[in-house]
Image (tube, grey):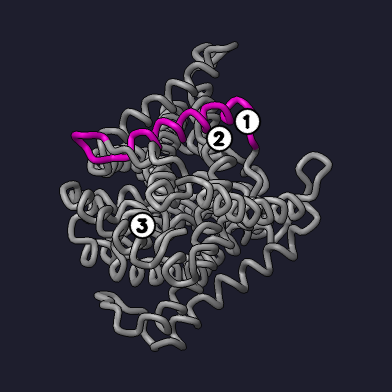
């Protein structure tokens, strides 16, 4: 069993090893966070179909105020006061104890099974819109595997390479949507869409999708050891990323709303069709290409985040030490990166659908643990240096976790009867949670027996 002194020693070793690779700066961090959270305005189509333009814009404004801004504030305080590799795992372990730290990592990695299987499939789907022949037969499967391999090599080059690459990908991603906004504004204003009745009205369903589209603010915390001046960089990056995400969601939807296009016609992948209506085939192809870019950027940046967790868990003795092995030139945990890539590669052909309840439940619980760790650390370590501090003392630290908790409860009530096949999604989520507790106690037994 690890003692507090052992944990401190391990943290010091992580900090020493990471000191040479603190190279990621504000702009690359904003771009990387953008891909972790958004990856473009894709995924908003179902909100428009369920709630209409006016309600969608309202949801896209209110949801970040209740969900994203509190999370960004929490991440800013914890990442600047405890800027260690492993991020939210370290925060929760330090604030709530080793059991909850383990659960934080388990929930994050379990959620990644569904999350990371999604993006190679999206990559192939958008390629199919560009050239159906290119992905016909087994070629599509091979291309998906090639994307995973490319993102793996990209990550082995280090966090700075991923961050700087994300800046370039962001420019390529935004260009078609800037063009779409211009075409929508030139088309002129029509008030007809507001009078069209919705065939699939579902306000709470739209809020759930918005929550999914606004998740991921804590993911970049796991590479704190590879960030230049993290106490200064994280708050700036969080603020910049929140503004960028909200603007990239609201501006295109608001522009298309002016055209009077039927909101019922929106569906997953609908941005391509909207681009064709407003700007012709060239714009449609450009938006499809941006979808390819978004899938690569999101997969690559999330890989950077998730793969640091097995490495830090290995350092703390919960996984074999080999997972903490670092690349001699870039300092990244290359064994953990390759192992995760192989695991996600096995899951990719299964073609998991985007099960929003499971994702919001599992990821949302991990985020709530971080809010609780924020409050616990205010009590347990009141003298901890906090370059950025959530205002309001302990009451403020507790209060900012209330809106996310309320949204979690509302979405669980709304979707408690959703099914995956014949199984209730809520039952699957509970099984994932119970498995995490069982694995923790099993790992403790194994650690006692290993000399």
Label 1 vs 3, first from the N-terminus: 3
Neighbourhood count class around disc 1 (C-alpha, 10 Å): few under 14, some 14–19, many 20 upward:
some
Q: Is 281 included in the stretch rendered in magenta?
A: no
Q: Position of residue 172 (x, y in %)?
A: 31, 37
Residue 117, numbered label: 2
User: In front: 443, or 114?
Assistant: 443
Residue 368, numbered label: none
- Give the SS element for disc 2: helix
Report the residue that reaches farthest toward the left.
Answer: 20
Residue 362 in sight here: yes
User: In front: 241, or 51?
Assistant: 241
Which residue does the image show at 41% across and 53% down from the upper left?
A: 316
User: Looking at the image, do the residues carrying marks 1 and 2 touch, with CB atoms under 8 Å apart?
Assistant: yes
Question: From the viewer's perspective, is the residue at label 1 or at label 3 nearer?
Answer: 3
Neighbourhood count class around disc 3 (C-alpha, 10 Å): few under 14, some 14–19, many 20 upward:
many
Label 2 vs 3, first from the N-terminus: 2
Question: From the viewer's perspective, is the residue at label 2 or at label 3 nearer?
Answer: 3
Q: Which residues are magenta?
A: 327-352
Q: Alpha carbon of mark 1 to alpha carbon of mark 2: how far?
A: 6 Å
Q: Is 333 included in the stretch rendered in magenta?
A: yes
Q: Position of residue 6 (x, y in %)?
A: 35, 61
Label 1 vs 2, first from the N-terminus: 2
Looking at the image, residue 418 sits to the left or right of residue 14; the answer is right
Residue at the disc numbered 1:
351
């Amino acid at each position: 069993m690890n003692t507090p002194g052992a944990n401190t020693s391990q943290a010091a070793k992580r900090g020493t090893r990471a000191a040479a690779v603190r190279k990621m700066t504000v702009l690359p961090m904003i771009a990387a966070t953008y891909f972790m959270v958004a990856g473009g305005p894709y995924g908003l189509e179902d909100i428009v179909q369920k709630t209409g333009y006016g309600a969608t814009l309202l949801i896209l404004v209110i949801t970040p105020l209740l969900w994203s801004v509190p999370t960004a504030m929490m991440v800013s305080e914890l990442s600047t006061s405890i800027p260690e590799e492993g991020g939210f795992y370290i925060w929760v372990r330090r604030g709530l104890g080793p059991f909850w730290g383990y659960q934080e990592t388990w929930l994050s990695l379990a959620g990644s099974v569904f999350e990371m299987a999604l993006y190679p499939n999206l990559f192939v789907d958008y390629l199919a819109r560009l050239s159906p022949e290119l992905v016909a037969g087994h070629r599509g499967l091979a291309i998906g595997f090639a994307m995973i391999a490319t993102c793996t090599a990209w990550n082995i080059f280090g966090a700075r390479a991923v961050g700087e690459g994300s800046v370039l990908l962001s420019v390529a991603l935004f260009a078609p949507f800037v063009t779409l906004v211009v075409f929508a504004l030139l088309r002129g204003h029509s008030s007809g869409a507001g009078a069209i009745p919705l065939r699939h009205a579902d306000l709470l369903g739209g809020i759930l999708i918005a929550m999914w589209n606004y998740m991921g603010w804590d993911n970049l915390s796991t590479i704190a050891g590879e960030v230049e001046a993290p106490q200064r960089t994280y708050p700036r990056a969080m603020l910049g990323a929140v503004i960028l995400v909200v603007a990239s969601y609201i501006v295109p939807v608001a522009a298309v709303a002016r055209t009077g296009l039927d909101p019922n016609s929106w569906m997953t992948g609908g941005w391509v069709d909207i681009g064709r209506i407003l700007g012709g085939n060239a714009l449609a192809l450009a938006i499809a290409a941006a979808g390819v870019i978004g899938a690569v950027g999101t997969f690559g940046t999330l890989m950077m985040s998730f793969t640091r967790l097995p490495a830090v868990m290995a350092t703390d003795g919960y996984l074999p030490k080999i997972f903490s092995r670092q690349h001699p030139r870039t300092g990244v945990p290359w064994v953990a990166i390759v192992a995760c890539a192989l695991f996600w590669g096995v899951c990719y052909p299964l073609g998991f659908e985007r099960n929003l309840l499971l994702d919001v439940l599992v990821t949302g619980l991990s985020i709530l643990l971080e809010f609780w760790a924020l409050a616990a650390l205010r009590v347990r370590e009141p003298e901890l240096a906090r370059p950025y501090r959530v205002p309001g003392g302990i009451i403020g630290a507790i209060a900012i976790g209330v809106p996310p908790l309320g949204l979690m409860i509302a979405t669980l009530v709304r979707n408690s009867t959703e099914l995956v096949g014949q199984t209730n999604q809520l039952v699957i989520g509970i099984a994932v949670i119970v498995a995490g507790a069982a694995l923790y106690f099993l790992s403790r037994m194994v650690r006692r027996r290993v000399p």
